[in-house]
């Protein structure tokens, strides 16, 4: 895939992403895809954006690069950071800038 942009993910909000853990996998749901403020730096190849994924598990995965698979987007590698926990599970964020 070429450089991913917000438009790639906008239509996938609410859909499942299988996160590969080697021997097993965890399903994340893309909860939000939103633009971030422009930096105004010359040479930027895409507008910055944020993705928020939700896991139904209470197990917190460490921040790192994960292999994900989605029915629409196919296979991707995304750096995820756990940013919140609530009664429904863990929320992970990915920032693209």
Image (cartoon, rainbow, N blue to C red):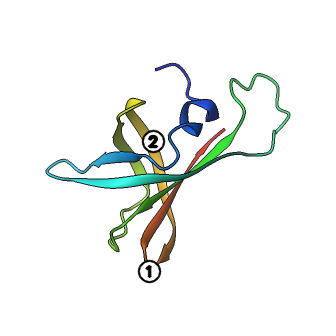
> Nearer the viewer's eye, disc 2 or disc 1?
1
Residue at x 82% of width, y 39% of height: 39
- Please rate how many residues cluster around mark 2, counting C-alpha atoms within 10 Å: few if below 14, some from 14 to 19, many from 20: some
Label 1 Cα neighbours within 10 Å, binned few <14 / some 14-19 / many ≥20:
few
Residue 46, position as x, y percentages in the image: 69, 28
Disc 1 secondary structure class? loop
In the rendered image, the vertical position of residue 89 relative to residue 19, given as above or below: below
Q: Residue 59 occupies which quadrant of the picture? A: bottom left
- Tag 2–tag 1 contact (CB < 8 Å): no
Task: From the image, tell me which residue sits under label 1.
Answer: 87
83 or 27, nearer to the observer? 27
Label 2 to label 1, Cα distance in Å? 25 Å
Image location of residue 87, percent across then percent down: 44, 80
Q: Furthest residue to the left? A: 23
Occupied quadrant, residue 77: top left
Q: Residue at x 40, y 34 (%)?
A: 76
- Element on which disc 2 rests: strand
Sequence order check, earlier mark of 2 and 1: 2
Q: Is 23 situated left or right of 94 in this image?
A: left
Return the residue at label 2. Answer: 78
Q: Name the residue nearer the viewer: 40 or 32.
A: 32
Residue 7 vs 37, above or below: the answer is: above
Residue occupying the point 59% across, 38% down: 10
Q: Residue furthest top?
A: 2
């Amino acid at each position: 895939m070429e450089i991913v942009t917000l438009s790639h993910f906008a239509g996938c909000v609410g859909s499942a992403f299988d996160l590969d853990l080697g021997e097993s996998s965890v399903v994340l749901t893309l909860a939000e895809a939103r633009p971030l403020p422009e930096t105004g730096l010359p040479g930027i190849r895409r507008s910055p954006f944020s993705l928020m994924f939700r896991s139904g598990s209470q197990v917190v995965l460490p921040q790192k690069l994960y292999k994900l698979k989605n029915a629409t987007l196919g296979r991707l590698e995304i750096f995820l950071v756990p940013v919140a926990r609530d009664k429904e599970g863990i929320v992970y964020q990915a920032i693209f800038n």
